[in-house]
Amino acid sequence: MASYESLADMASNKGVEDPNLSSAIVMPFGLLSVESEDVRKQKVNWQSYVQSQMINQEDYTMIADYDCMGAEERGRILEQKGDQFAKSCLSMLTRLSRDQTIRYILVLIDDVLTEERSRVSIFHEFGKRANINVWTLFLKLLNRQDQFIVHQTGIIIAKLASWGKVLLPDSDLNYFLSWMKNGLASSGNGYHHSVAQCLQLMLRHQVYRQAFFKADGIQSVVSALVAPNIGFQLQYQLIFVLWLLSFDPRIAERMIGKSAVIRVIADILRESGKEKVTRIIIATLRNLLEKPEEKKNEAALSMIQCKLLPVLSVLNGKTWVDEDITDDVEFVYEKLNERVQDLSTFDEYAAEVRSGRLEWSPVHKSEKFWRENAQRLNEKNYELLKILTKLLDKSNDPTILAVAAHDTGEYVRHYPRGKHVLENLGCKVMVMKMMTHNDPNVRKEALLAVQKLMVHNWEYLGKQLKAS
């Protein structure tokens, strides 16, 4: 079986896919799929349209004949009269307004494209010869009130943009990417699967990956993944999107750095029992360890901090039918084991802080650690202190707040100029606010931290604390 990367490259350049993944790319899921079946059963009375002169005789003959043919006959007519078919469909989408009819025409077009991908050229070539902007025609339909029409149109645009040689122009691309991002962010409309499918189609192309990344697309996918009760199929589709993005080293760097990608998919890996979800998560983790050469150590640190080694140990002991899963699990497991051997205590601490998941691990209470490493919190323009400050400001987790308050106190206790640093970062104010927190442990750690900020005789304070 071909590697994941070669499959993605083939998909991008030739439209070739791994058969085991094709269903996630070309098959609709969710509400759109159910409604499409209903639309196919509702035949349109084309005769009434021609009699009322809403469509001309030529378009009527084309669509009425095509509508009553079998699959083989339809294939032949598309080979012989593809230009006329495209003209008739686009003309009717422009001239007609009834939702039921627009639905039917869109499903007809989508079926034509799905049956044979090369048929996207029928529409592109007609548009070029007739000097018609096919993109504009379809993009306008995204503004309709009928959500089936909107999302079926989105699928068609994605296929036209992905399966042919004509790329979506930049201005139209940005509009379509914004539409997809908004679709992921919407709640309760039932069409998230189709929006994810659009992204799965589009992001096989490097130019679209870059544009989605620049539009802060990673965050929109992560936000959709952490939404409640999304189901394993949508999890799979969205992580598939992240996997496609991770083939670009520059994008992979961002996924490792400031985004929460590793943390979110690590959580899903621990909880999911679906092999297809496991497969795509492990493949994504492998990409993040391989693609950005200069970030691989940081990627491994993040994965270790997310407690993935015990999970991978279990997965590495399983027997998988798919050799790709076996290879990827072994690769990721070995790389994390190699990295954990090289970790310093400070590396582990920094990774924990960057993950935003503070817990009472031994390092926080280690006098030796703070004596040797307090000053290192000044590195990279006070990166770790800024994260601790942000956690104190934004987190609702009592453990995280308590540990963050404790660590700021230990920093200022062991670094003589730490008080001024914390004041300048706004951290002192955040710690003082925690003194009135409703959790007693948070209040306690905040009080101790404030005492350390205020008192200069650390030895005396230490004795007082022991006495209490």
Image (tube, rainbow, N blue to C red):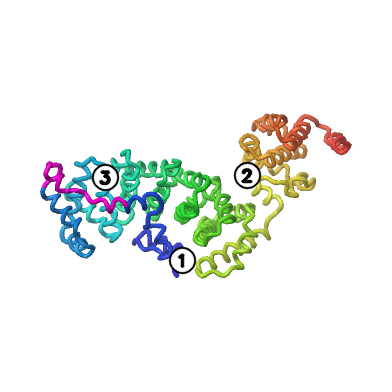
Q: Is residue 358 left or right of residue 19?
A: right
**What residue sits 27% from the left and 42% below the top?**
99
Question: Residue sitting at 41 percent across and 58 percent down?
Answer: 24
Residue position for label 1: 3
Local packing at callout 2 (Cα closer than 10 Å; few below 14, some 14-19, many 20+) is: some
- The image position of residue 264, as x and y in percent, is 56, 50
Q: Which residue is mark 2?
A: 356
Q: Which mark is residue 100?
A: 3
| Amino acid type for the residue under numbered disc 3 | Gln
Question: Image quarter for residue 118?
Answer: bottom left
Q: Nearer the viewer, mark 1 or mark 3?
A: 3
Can residue 404 be seen here? The reply is: yes
Point out residue 37 in the picture as x, y percentages from the top left corner.
32, 54
* Tag shown at residue 457: none
> For the residue marked with disc 2, what is the amino acid?
Gly
Disc 2 is placed on an element classified as: loop
- The residue at the point 69 percent across, 42 percent down is 399
Above or below residue 34? Residue 325 is below
Secondary structure under tag 1 reads loop
